[in-house]
Amino acid sequence: MHFHLEKDCRAESDCPILSLSWMGRVPNELIEQEGSWRLNRSSYYQEGWLATGNARAIAGVTFTSSHSRKHTDLPVRTNYNLRGHRSQIVLVRWNEPYQKLATCDSSGIIFVWIKYEGRWSIELINDRSTPVTHFSWSHDGRMALICYQDGFVLVGSVAGQRYWSSNLRLSSNIVCGTWTPDDQQVFFGSLTGQLVVMDVHGAMVSNVTLLEGVPVLEMSWNCEKFKMEERDDTTAGSGKRRQLVLAVSFENGLIHLMNSYDDVLPVVVRTGLLGIKMEWCNSGELLAVAGQRLDGDSTPGVFTNLVHFYTSQGERRYISRLPCRTCGVTALTWGHNGRRLFIATGAMVHVAWIGRRVAPLQLLCRLSIKDALATEEATALLPLPRRVKLQLAGLFSPTLRSHIPDTGCLRQFIAQPPDGSTRLHCTMIRNEDDFVTSSAMYTLYLEHFGGLIPLLKGKRTSKIRPEFIIFDPSVSGDAEPRPILTVAPQREATAAPPSDSSDTEEERCHTPRTARRRWRRRAERETAGEDEPAAEPPELRYQPGSATLAQVTSNIWGTKFRVLGVAPNVAPDLGQISYKTSLLHLQPRQMTLVMTELSRRRCAAGSSAGLPGTRRGSRDDDRDERFRHRPSQASVGGSEAGARPCRTGVSLSLSRPAAAESPPPPPPSRDRGRAPVIAADTDDEAAAAPELDHLRESLLRMKHEMDAKMRPEPPPDPVSSKVRVLNGLNALASPRRAARSQSVNRADRARCHVVSHGRTGDAAAGGDLAGRRTSSAPAGEPALGGAVPPTSRPEPTPAAGGGSQMEAIKFIDDDGEDERPVAPRIPPNRSQSLNFISGHGVTLDMVAETASAPRSRVVLIPRPSRRLKRVKSHSLGAAPSGRLGDWLTDSGAVRQKKQPPPTGTPAGAGRAAVLHAEAAVRAKLRVPEELRGCHSSPVTPVARRKERKATGTPPISRRLLSSPLLCRRRMPSSTESSEDESAEVTRSQPFTSLESLQRSQVRNKLRRGIRDSSQAPEGAAAPSPPTQRRQPPCRQLIMHNIAPLWNESSQVYQLDFGGRVTQESAKNFQIQYCGDQVMQFGRIDGNAYTLDFQYPFSAVQAFAVALANVTQRFK
Amino acid sequence: MSEGAEKMDEDPQYGGCEGPDATYVKLRSSDNHEFIVKREHALTSGTIRNMLSGPGQFKENETNEVTFKEIPSHVLQMVCMYFTYKVRYTNSSTEIPDFQIDPKVALELLMAANFLYC
């Protein structure tokens, strides 16, 4: 075997880690089927979550990856700090089949966490107010075993139901428990070296003394930790199955390897270690044992930590020494199916790479070279072939992946917005430790690994005005790139109440007075009830007189703030914050931010945003809004014609039928011409030439169809709708269309996510659920969706809809829906999430479906199919050959054909469309086998099977998919897309909410700014002379806070903080930029706030905004 | 070089490097050093295995001698030591020591290992 330690500073928390547990990651996009997620074994174990329980009552859940590539797509959030416990967390245990996490603290409270909609929330609470000594999930994940210090043992279900409990009145305490591999018995180890055996119903079976008077530490069988495969033939494999071994570790460093509890001749392993932590690797071949050497240095406080590996026969395979000498080993766990070993020594977690075989010479050489190199960048300079270099660089890729500053780059890190859609989750804590001036100090910490990494520190400078300075972080000593961590002994509970990440409740903004009252109440409660000394978060140690990085200045009223950069590495003008003055505090705060965009790269992207590349690069359709005008510029003018004649041709041929069919007002007609160009514009160069002919042909053909369809009566007539469906069939079945969709598919690789939903959506409810832009571009139907003039949208008249099959399907759908119960209305206060719903409607309710079934399990597919893996690796839209795409259309055709000829009844057709959509969604899961055959064969049993599955889905999702409500709801979005051209349109429009007003204003300002030859738009600030800002170094972005919604029933303003905010406060806010919530700030404790932000905020700016907000006074 | 004489001196019970079933093979470095190693050990390297057991297009197949024009002797020596290490500790249940690599030769050794596919 082979073992080497990873050198990674990330694997460090700010307080001792007492427990570790690792679990594979279920991809977000994976949707369960038949109550379980089906996963490919090899890919499942490549990514995972490492749970840490630490002494500061926070459980960390951190993403780990064993990919050697550094920039694999990380999940949206790579770290969760789960707050809720009030004393140190002694145990964390994943339940892998059910994807739950159990955490136990030293006071005996057990939480079971479950992840739902991207956040972890407490599902179960168990509090017996007796310390828990052990917690263990059964191997099938269905049961849990809890041992208490007083000899009480309990077996319950994963859902929280108690099966049995018993008070073992032994002479000594129970310290650990374990399940037998078949989950039929539970074993307990006691302080006096006894082994107690009970069966699964709680009946005592046996009581054996293993080592008289020597406390048992841990027990574990060398079976798989969890049975992830649902095998029916449990007896079939048993013949070749190896003998399972129970390892029992004792305090004196002995380990007994026993075949059963009454094994009279156990293999005795003398490890020579103290404080043993051990765990079998998942395959059961190796037992990792870590501890402190018995005969080590006698000096107190110096530890010699060793890791031993033993085979199941008790032979020692390998010994390694851990570098940490200040703490003993506190926890150990295997990860990534035996490829990684995590060992915690105090606050540090050592990540070891394990190879089961003798390492290849290449790897040994690479490691030797790696040790000699200082940084990963140095590999580029080595005289090695590229492939070898890449392999070498792969060794540098950390197992723990997080968006945390690299060593030495803190200064850069805080001055630039995080990349892409990365969101930083921070905590801001007020620490009044500056006794000299008694001014408030605030520290901004990045949440990581269950701990906090200090980023920035700010101090209030003025007694009267809310003015602050922010210190420059890297002045604290250049020799040490990482800020030094010290733990101040001040007692202040930073743990939030258990309701912290609780899911359902919406956080509230309230009047400050009630909030204050609450804090007082809370503070009283804390001082009265708690005597658990919770440690203070780490401190950024600045040298006295350290340099200032930025200043926050204010007017005397505290309503206008400026953030000024002082240090040379930040821009002099970082931004401004202005609050709308309100005398009576009756209204929620309204703030306007003018932020300087700090990232140079982003700046460049912004100026050249008209290029398709930038669109591809940007994250999602919402964000794209701000670039939306640019393709239109290109298409309206004829300048594009010279460069790309074919494309303009397409757009013309498209606009002609559109203009002919209905007499629209001039601006919408321009719109129509434009929409396809948007699609074509994002097209790849490669995809353009040969396929354009097809494209044009099929478009012409479709034009004929359209003309044909112009004639029939409005959709309510079943006959006409039949015609349409048939037309639709033709188009769907046409191979050309398939080819075209393929090209579009490939072109929109960047937006593949949207595209895929668009595709499913457009068949369902005619794409109302899909993003607006999606419907115009990748749906491939000419002049559709967003391009349809808004005036003609509200009523599905044939004039508007005559354009395409897709529309036809939609209308039929609508008709069908009229007879059904109306879908539950989305309450108006969900307007924020509406974008999300409309963009991802399909996935959304699939996810809801997933989450609503708590009994769903993770099941690994025993034999990984290669095809499945390939499909998994590409997302739907990005399937390289577009085969998936045309497979979908083909299957769509199949589906439609399978409908009996009289599809004319509107309801039936609507249902068909919906079925198709759902089938398509499901198809994403089960693509593998069908990929091949389905190409040409029109009727396959596969399709039928899928149909059956589709009918099995709950009717609510179907209703939602095809709800006429959503259809209407999309309307305003289409106006938004057209308003780029005519700003006046938006002005004249009545605004439904403050939010929409703000958004439109921002957009107007932005647009104006770009029109003025990219002069920076200045909002509240005095506009600088345009002449000297021809080419501004940085853009300035105007943002507003999201208006909270008034809840009539509870009489509070509400905002959804996604579980990150636990206390209501008038200071809580969210900032919106281009339709995205890009920053949120809220109170979690009397002196602690969470601060989450992403592009365009840098840490300095976000911190400044938070500081300006936190002491803000209105006079 | 007197490789012929050397071979004659060897005790026949250890087998020689000749014939299709020879126990030993000869690896020749770029600076003309010869390393006579057990065939079983040399087969650790995928490249050598292909050369020695391929369907006859290599002349090495007959002569049991492989010349590496790119690998100097101080690297080939490490390679041969690795062969022994690998064979010794594969499928054994004894404790595995670390295989020490001098950082000075690590780059060359990596290139050689990459070529030899071991």
Image (tube, coloured by chain):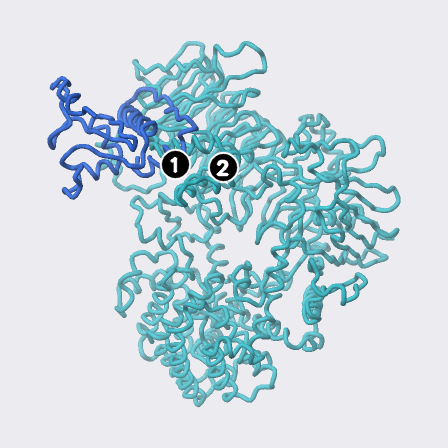
Chain colours: A cyan, B blue
Q: Quadrant of the N terminus of chain A?
A: top left
Residue A590 left/right relative to B54: right
Mark pair 2, 1: CA separation: 13 Å
Q: Amino acid at mark 2?
A: Leu
Along the viewing direction, whichever of A981 and A969 lies nearer the viewer:
A981
Identified at 34% across, 72% down, the residue is A893
Looking at the image, can residue A919 be seen? Answer: yes
Identified at 50% across, 33% down, the residue is A373
Q: Amino acid at mark 1?
A: Asn
Residue A572, image x, y percentages: 76, 51
Is label 2 in contact with label 1 (beta carbons under 8 Å)? no
Residue A1023, image x, y percentages: 79, 64
Q: On the image, which quarter does residue B112 sit in?
A: top left
The disc at residue A738 is none
Residue at the front extreme, as displayed: B1
Q: How many marks?
A: 2
Q: Is residue A755 above or below residue A536?
A: below
Number of other residues with Cα within 10 Å of mark 2, as a class: few under 14, some 14 to 19, many 20 or more: many
Circle 2: element type? strand
Residue A230 left/right relative to A855: left
Along the viewing direction, whichever of A360 and A507 lies nearer the viewer:
A360
Q: Is residue B82 above or below residue A1034?
A: above
Looking at the image, can residue A203 be seen? Answer: no
Circle 1: element type? helix
Q: On the image, which quarter does residue A629 sit in?
A: bottom right
Q: Is residue A1014 above or below residue A273?
A: below
Disc nearer the start of the sequence (2/1): 2
Residue A291, image x, y percentages: 47, 19
* Chain letter for the residue marked with disc 2 in the picture: A
Q: Which residue is mark 2?
A: A50
Q: Which residue is mark 1?
A: A337
Q: Is residue A556 above or below residue B7?
A: below
